[in-house]
Amino acid sequence: MTRPRPVIAIDGPAGVGKSTTSRELARRLGYTLVDTGALYRGVALAARDRGISWDEEAAVVALCPQIELGFVSQDDGTPRLLLDGRDRGDDIRTPEMSSGASKVSAYPGVRRALLGIQRQLGREGGVVLEGRDIGTVVFPDALLKVYLTASVEVRAKRRAKEMTDLDYDEVAADIARRDAADAGRDDSPLATAGDAVTVDTSEMGIDEAVDALVAMVEKRSATADATETSDGH
Ligand code: DC
C-alpha cells in the first residue's frame, strides 16, 4: 500500500508573507495550494451579495450550506476563488472583505461548515494549506506544520509597500486589529500547534524561508519512508 501524499499546514497572522511563501512552496514541491482565508472571504462576499449583514450570525451561518465554494488554479499556481461557479478572485481582495472575513470567521457555525470543505480539498494529499488553524484543527496530522511569524512593524511595512495607496499607520492598525480578532476568538483561535515549527520571517527573504521549508518537507518525508520500510509496510 502506498502512503498518502503529504499535507503541509502553513499558519500565521495577516501580512506575514503566508500566501507568497505557500505558493512558492507548493510550486517547488509540485503540490496544490489551498488558500483557506479565501473561503472565509467567500462567505463574507456571498453575504454581501445577498444583503445579509455580517453581524447577523444566524443568517450568515444559514447561508453556508446554500453556497458552493471551490478554486480554480491560475497558471502560476495561485488559487482563485469560485463562488457558485463564478470566479470572484478579485472581489474578495478588498479591505472591506478583509474585515467581513474577520467577522464571519469568528462564528462557530461558519467554521464548522468550512472545516468539511477544507478537509475535502486536502483529502488526497500533495497539498499545502495556508490559514490560521490548519495545524491545530483542520489537519492536526499534517506531515509538517509551520507557524510563520514576523513583527507587526515588518508586516505593515511589507503590506504598505504592496498596496501603494495605503498608509503605513492605517495598515499597522488594521493588522494589529485583525491579529487581536484572530487570536481572541473562542473557536479555533490563531495559535501555534505544539508540534509546529515556528519560522520568523522578519529578517528573512521569501526564498530563504521557502528553501528552509522544502528541506524540512524532504527530511520528514524521508523519515516517514524509512519508518514505513522498517515496519515492513
Ligand atoms: O488570510 P486571509 O487574510 O485571507 O484571511 C481572511 C480572514 O479569515 C482572517 O480574518 C482570518 C480568517 N481565517 C480563519 O479564521 N481561519 C483560516 N484558516 C483562514 C482565515
Image: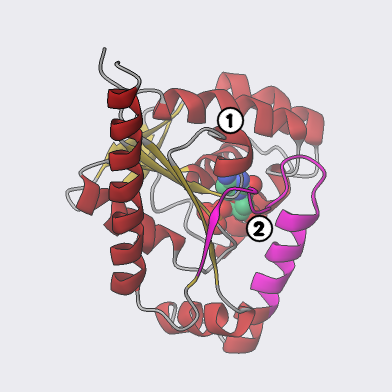
> SS at mark 2?
helix
At x 70%, y 78%, the residue is: 173
Name of the residue lying farthest toward the top = 1
Residue 113 is at least partly visible in this image: yes
Of residue 4 and residue 19, the one placed in the foreground of this image is: 4
Type of amino acid under label 1: Leu
At x 64%, y 71%, the residue is: 175
Mark 1 and ligand 1: say if the CB distance to the nearest ligand atom is below 8 Å. yes
Q: Label 1, on which residue?
A: 114
x, y (%) of residue 9?
A: 47, 45
x, y (%) of residue 129?
A: 43, 43
> SS at mark 1?
helix
x, y (%) of residue 104?
A: 70, 43
**On the rendered image, what quadrant is the N terminus found in?**
top left
Residue 100 belongs to the span the image colors magenta: no
Type of amino acid under label 2: Ser
Magenta residues, start to end: 173-199
Residue 32 is at least partly visible in this image: no
Local crowd size for mark 2, using a 10 Å CA cut-off: few (<14), some (14–19), many (≥20): some
Q: Indicate which disc residue 99 carries.
A: 2
Residue 99 sits above or below residue 150 on the image: above
Name of the residue lying farthest toward the left = 75
x, y (%) of residue 215?
A: 29, 57
Residue 182 sits above or below residue 114 on the image: below
Local crowd size for mark 1, using a 10 Å CA cut-off: few (<14), some (14–19), many (≥20): many
At x 45%, y 60%, the residue is: 18
Residue 226 sits above or below residue 215 on the image: above
